[in-house]
């Protein structure tokens, strides 16, 4: 199961176990059970603190295994074989159940331990989903820290009968005490905040007590991270308020155009950005959604940013780096069938459509890449592009046209997503050349039509373009003195990670220059 290098690395990790653990395995006669057995038999000899036995309870899923701290009821369970993106989840679960301290704040640990209630979580994941490990690892850790919390991580591709019965069409899908609870990427902090009903109130109180910043960055993606690093290196008081650190990058699979890094993946880049920001004295305020910008009453005064939880932050300068999100089609059926066949992440949700018919809307690089990836999983892909021709790079178009289970439709305007029994059943589109209407029967629709800036909260307070982008000049200055902007939320062309990073750095340098000039004037 494991190659020699991974086995050596895993053995080194297992040397960090502080308490004995047991791998409690539940097998059946399937080939996957044989694979799981081989994996567990490779892990068991790596430490004298690891034991291996078979599960006697016939009610548990098979194949599955629990990692249990000996002599306690602390455990986590994987239903399936946690390889691919979930291999890190397996390693962390082994370490944490074995007593290795987690890398989270003591405050958050105490908050988890104080949660009052009995929580039994089930998370359905796919091995190709880059967003799933965050949820799996968060709930695993919570079950280690609080014995009243239980968690089972389930490979949806391996337990298709459950996926069909529960009508799961997007991952990660989280069930709590047998009922649907959440879908999509969530951090540990987000999950805890949702369970701890007073956490938002306490957090608002803490934020209101903070001193004014010299530079306050709104947004924690590539632009926001770069801005915070460049500002903090100047030795000035710097803060980041972000709804989700990493932003849209966390939902990106392969990244091959970040100069000097031939290949990486979104979650890895987000982790690297956060680690880099933490090298400096930056106050990171995560899970904070900005709702109102109140400009300073005079040039050089304090700007105010009001947050959704009622808190307010003040700063001498502000850098807006709120990024963008997936653009929606805006047609009937899209909202109704979201996560019931309408999806936006082919890497995450593609495996749930194995052997089925799907459509990809959009003929740019993202759409064509999605169609190529899905063609290797699903039964058939129909790609629909609004324009007269595909807009993707030629190398991608050539690959797409070589696939025998893909149909390409250009000059097609999607007009409706149809459904039956609460799930997608097809879509309607108009041939823009003839006006003729067509129906395509299918089970999934993946929307890949670009991005829309996260700037609605700024309307009326700052100058925006007709597309909702923040208008900036070559120094990243906005229409408000002392307020700068960078990244995908601005009018800067070409929404690319490397460009956002450069723009964030430039915005921070401009903010620093502004502070120097106004300090001198004062």
Image: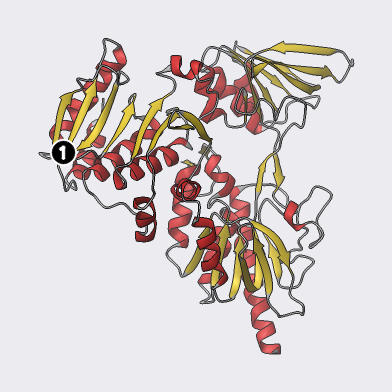
Viewer-side residue, 23 vs 82:
23
Give the position of the C terminus as an image quadrant.
Answer: bottom right
Viewer-side residue, 460 vs 485:
460
Up/down of 80 relative to 136, above or below = above
Left or right relative to 52: residue 332: right
Which residue is at a point 63% across and 65% down the rendered structure image?
A: 506
Residue 92 seen in this snapshot: yes
Up/down of 325 relative to 362, above or below = below
Crowding at mark 1 (Cα within 10 Å: few <14, some 14-19, many 20+): some
Left or right relative to 35: residue 316: right
* Quadrant in which residue 397 is drawn: top right
Image coordinates of residue 327 in percent, x first then y, are 71, 38
User: What secondary structure is found at the residue carrying circle 1?
Assistant: loop
Which residue is at a point 37% across and 59% down the rendered structure image?
A: 105
Residue furthest front in the image: 117
Residue 230 seen in this snapshot: no
Image coordinates of residue 515 in percent, x first then y, are 65, 79
Viewer-side residue, 150 vs 419:
150
Up/down of 503 relative to 192, above or below = below
Give the position of the N terminus as an image quadrant.
Answer: top left
Numbered-mark total: 1
Q: Name the residue under label 1.
A: 70
Image coordinates of residue 267 in percent, x first then y, are 47, 44
């Amino acid at each position: 199961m494991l190659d020699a290098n991974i086995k050596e690395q895993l053995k080194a990790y297992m040397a960090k176990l502080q308490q004995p653990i047991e791998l409690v395995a539940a097998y059946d006669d399937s080939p996957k059970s044989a694979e799981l057995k081989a994996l567990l038999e490779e892990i068991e000899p790596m430490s004298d603190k690891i034991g291996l036995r078979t599960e006697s309870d016939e009610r548990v899923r098979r194949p599955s295994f629990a990692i249990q701290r000996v002599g306690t009821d602390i455990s986590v369970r994987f239903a399936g074989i946690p390889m691919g993106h979930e291999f890190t989840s397996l390693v962390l679960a082994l370490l944490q159940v074995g007593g290795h301290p987690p890398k989270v704040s003591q405050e958050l640990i105490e908050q988890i331990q104080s949660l009052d209630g009995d929580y039994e979580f089930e998370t359905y994941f796919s091995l190709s989903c880059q967003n799933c490990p965050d949820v799996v690892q968060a709930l695993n850790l919570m079950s280690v820290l609080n014995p009243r919390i239980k968690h089972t991580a389930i490979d949806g591709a391996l337990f298709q009968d459950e996926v069909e019965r529960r009508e799961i069409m997007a991952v990660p899908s989280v069930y709590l005490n047998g009922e649907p609870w959440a879908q999509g990427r969530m951090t540990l902090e987000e999950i805890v905040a949702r369970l701890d009903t007073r956490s938002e109130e306490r957090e608002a109180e803490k934020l209101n007590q903070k001193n004014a910043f010299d530079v306050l960055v709104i947004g924690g993606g590539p632009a926001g991270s770069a801005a915070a690093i460049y500002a903090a290196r100047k030795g000035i008081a710097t803060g980041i308020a972000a709804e989700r650190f990493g932003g849209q990058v966390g939902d990106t699979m392969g990244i091959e155009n970040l100069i000097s890094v031939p290949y990486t993946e979104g979650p890895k880049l987000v982790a690297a950005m956060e680690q880099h920001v933490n090298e400096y004295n930056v106050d990171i305020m995560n899970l904070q959604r900005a709702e109102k910008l109140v400009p300073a009453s005079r040039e050089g005064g304090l700007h105010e940013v009001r947050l959704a939880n009622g808190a307010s932050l003040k700063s001498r300068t502000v850098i807006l780096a709120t990024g963008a999100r997936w653009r929606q089609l805006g047609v009937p059926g899209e909202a109704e069938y979201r996560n019931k066949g309408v999806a936006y992440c082919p890497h995450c949700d593609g495996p749930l459509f194995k052997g089925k018919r799907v459509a990809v809307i959009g003929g740019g690089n993202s759409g064509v890449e999605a169609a190529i990836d899905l063609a290797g999983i699903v039964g058939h892909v129909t790609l629909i592009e609004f324009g007269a021709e595909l807009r993707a790079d030629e190398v991608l178009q050539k690959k797409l046209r070589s696939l025998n289970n893909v149909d390409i439709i250009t000059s097609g305007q999607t007009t409706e997503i149809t459904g039956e029994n609460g799930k997608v059943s097809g879509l309607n589109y108009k041939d823009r050349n003839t006006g003729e209407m067509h129906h395509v029967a299918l089970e999934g629709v993946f929307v890949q039509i670009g991005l829309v800036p996260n700037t609605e909260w700024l309307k009326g307070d700052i100058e925006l373009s007709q597309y909702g982008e923040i208008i900036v000049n070559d120094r990243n200055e906005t229409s408000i003195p002392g307020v700068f902007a960078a990244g995908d939320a601005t009018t800067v062309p070409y929404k690319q990670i490397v460009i956002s990073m450069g723009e964030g750095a430039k915005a921070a340098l401009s903010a620093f220059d502004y502070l120097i000039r106004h300090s001198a004037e004062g």
